[in-house]
Structure formats: C-alpha cells, structure tokens
Image: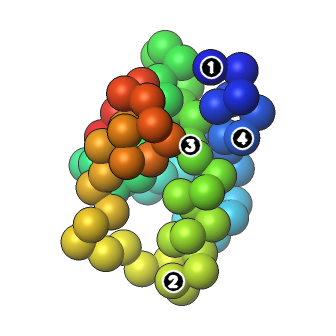
Amino acid sequence: MTDELTMGLTANAVAKHLNCNVVTVRRWAKEGKLPYLSLGGRRMIFSRRVIDELLARGGKFQNNDKKTGEEVNGTNNWKR
C-alpha cells in the first residue's frame, strides 16, 4: 500500500491538475469516474497514472473510465 500512496494524489491535488473544484473531484470519484483509495472520512488518494491519462485526453472521460481496481493497479483496493 505504501507504493500506491506515494504514486497517488490527494483530491486537492487532482482538483488543481484538472483545474476544477475539489467537490467535483469527490463527486466524480463517488460516481465511479475516478478510481480512488479511501483513507477514511473524506480522505481519498487517486492514481497519478489515471489522472495523467485523463489530462492526456484533454480532461474528457471515456465510457471505459469506470475501471475496477484490478484494471487500475492490479489490486482490488481501488473503489469505483
């Protein structure tokens, strides 16, 4: 899990990268558009790779963005 956390971004960092509000990032996570690791409460960690892929597409979601944890990083810890 340590490797996953060091490779991850907080909701605030994702919001800055995507130039949107942190509330929007959390909503996308709860809707299953952005896979995340829950750290309890409202604390979430997001995959840097997934965010980079989203930015490479110009910030546009695709139909296959609802990935399972295994598709994201080989574990089932990621929530959708």
The answer for how far apart the CA atoms under marks 3 and 2 are is 17 Å
Question: Which residue is labeled 1 in the image?
Answer: 1
Q: Tell me which numbered mark, 3 or 4, is placed earlier along the sequence.
A: 4
Looking at numbered disc 1 in the image, what kind of residue is underneath it?
A: Met
* CB under 8 Å between discs 3 and 2: no
Question: Which residue is labeled 2 in the image?
Answer: 57
* CB under 8 Å between discs 3 and 4: no
Question: Which residue is labeled 4 in the image?
Answer: 7
The answer for how far apart the CA atoms under marks 3 and 4 are is 8 Å
* CB under 8 Å between discs 2 and 4: no
The residue shown at (31%, 75%) is 62
The answer to whether residue 29 is seen in the rendering is: no
Q: Residues within 10 Å of mark 1 (few under 14, many from 20)?
A: few
Question: Which residue is labeled 3 in the image?
Answer: 46
Q: Quadrant of residue 56?
A: bottom right
Q: Tell me which numbered mark, 1 or 2, is placed earlier along the sequence.
A: 1
The answer to whether residue 25 is seen in the rendering is: yes
Q: Nearer the viewer, mark 3 or mark 1?
A: 1
Where residue 43 appears, as percent x and y from the top left, is 55, 25
Where residue 40 appears, as percent x and y from the top left, is 49, 14
Q: Secondary structure at mark 4?
A: loop
